[in-house]
Image (cartoon, helix red, strand yellow):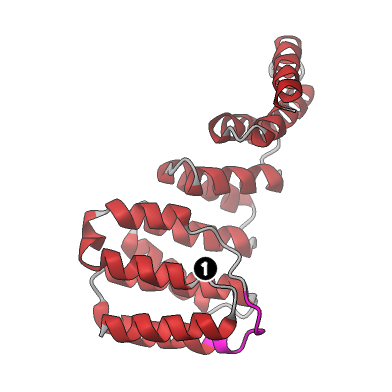
């Protein structure tokens, strides 16, 4: 219950007054990790992120902490700079983490680093190790990024490539990615105002769970863009 979780929070906070980072760094990080998970259960993203960031100062290769910080800062707190810095640090020691590289591509976009995003996307899309879901996400970010760069001539071909990729997937298809951060960014950024309504429809199309419906929706937005 919420009451029990709140009591757990207080217990962990009291433990931190004894398990200090200076004297007992590993125990401190373990308590921070437990506190983070409790805050997550309480639907408190801000405190969850703060605690997991603390964990990463002691255990910089804790992937669960990294992924949770990335997810919450990007899609619920809309702290795009924080999400960008978090991935940047993670990729310094885990550059082979493709999921993190894809997250970083999205974060380059939502911090307005559109030229850097374009280059990063090109590198990743040439990778042979991409699973289909991550490749779909990259094409999605690429289309939004092309719009931000006003490279509208390339969007038709990019949508065609995305359609071709999705056609190869199973009939029941779920794009496993939260685009909340991207949607929020698109809704506010000046450079995307001209294509805002179109981009929102484009992202909504990917929320469907049927391959053929997604393809049909993408064909419609492709036609609408023309």
Residue at horizontal 62%, vertical 45%?
Answer: 68
Q: Is residue 141 visible?
A: no
Badge 1 marks a residue whose secondary structure is loop
Residue 222 vs residue 169: left or right? Answer: left
Image quarter where the C terminus lies is: bottom left
**Residue 174 x %, y %:** 61, 71
**Residue 197 x %, y %:** 28, 66
Q: Main secondary structure of the magenta part?
A: loop
Within 10 Å of disc 1 (Cα), the crowding (few <14, some 14-19, many 20+) is some
Q: Is residue 59 visible?
A: yes
Residue 46 on the magenta segment: no
**Residue 180 x %, y %:** 46, 54
133 vs 38: above or below: below
Say which quarter of the image contains residue 144: bottom left
21 vs 164: above or below: above
Tell me the residue that label 1 is attached to: 207
Tell how many labels: 1
Residue 172 on the magenta segment: yes
**Residue 122 x %, y %:** 44, 75
80 vs 39: above or below: below
Give the magenta range.
Answer: 165-173
34 vs 9: above or below: below
Please state which of residues 151 and 181 is positioned toward the viewer in this rendering. 181
Please state which of residues 151 and 47 is positioned toward the viewer in this rendering. 47
Residue 68 vs residue 207: left or right? Answer: right
Residue at horizontal 75%, vertical 28%?
Answer: 1
Residue at horizontal 44%, vertical 81%?
Answer: 217
């Amino acid at each position: 219950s919420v009451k029990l979780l709140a009591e757990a929070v207080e217990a962990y906070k009291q433990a931190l007054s004894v398990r200090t980072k200076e004297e007992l760094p590993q125990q401190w990080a373990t308590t921070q990790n437990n506190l983070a998970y409790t805050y997550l259960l309480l639907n408190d993203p801000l405190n969850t992120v703060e605690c997991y960031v603390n964990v990463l100062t002691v255990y910089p290769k804790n992937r669960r902490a990294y992924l949770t910080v990335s997810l919450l800062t990007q899609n619920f707190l809309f702290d795009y700079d924080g999400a960008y810095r978090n991935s940047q640090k993670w990729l310094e020691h885990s550059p082979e983490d493709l999921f993190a590289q894809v997250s970083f591509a999205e974060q380059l976009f939502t911090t307005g680093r559109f030229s850097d995003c374009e280059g990063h996307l090109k590198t990743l899309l040439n990778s042979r190790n991409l699973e289909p879901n991550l490749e779909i996400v990259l094409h999605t970010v690429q289309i939004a990024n092309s719009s931000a760069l006003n490279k509208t001539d390339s969007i038709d071909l990019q949508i065609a490539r995305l359609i071709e990729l999705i056609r190869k997937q199973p009939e029941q298809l779920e794009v496993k990615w939260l685009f909340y951060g991207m949607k929020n960014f698109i809704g506010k950024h000046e450079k995307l105002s001209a294509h805002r309504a179109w981009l929102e429809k484009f992202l909504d199309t990917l929320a469907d769970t049927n391959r053929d419906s997604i393809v049909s929706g993408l064909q419609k937005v492709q036609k609408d863009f023309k």
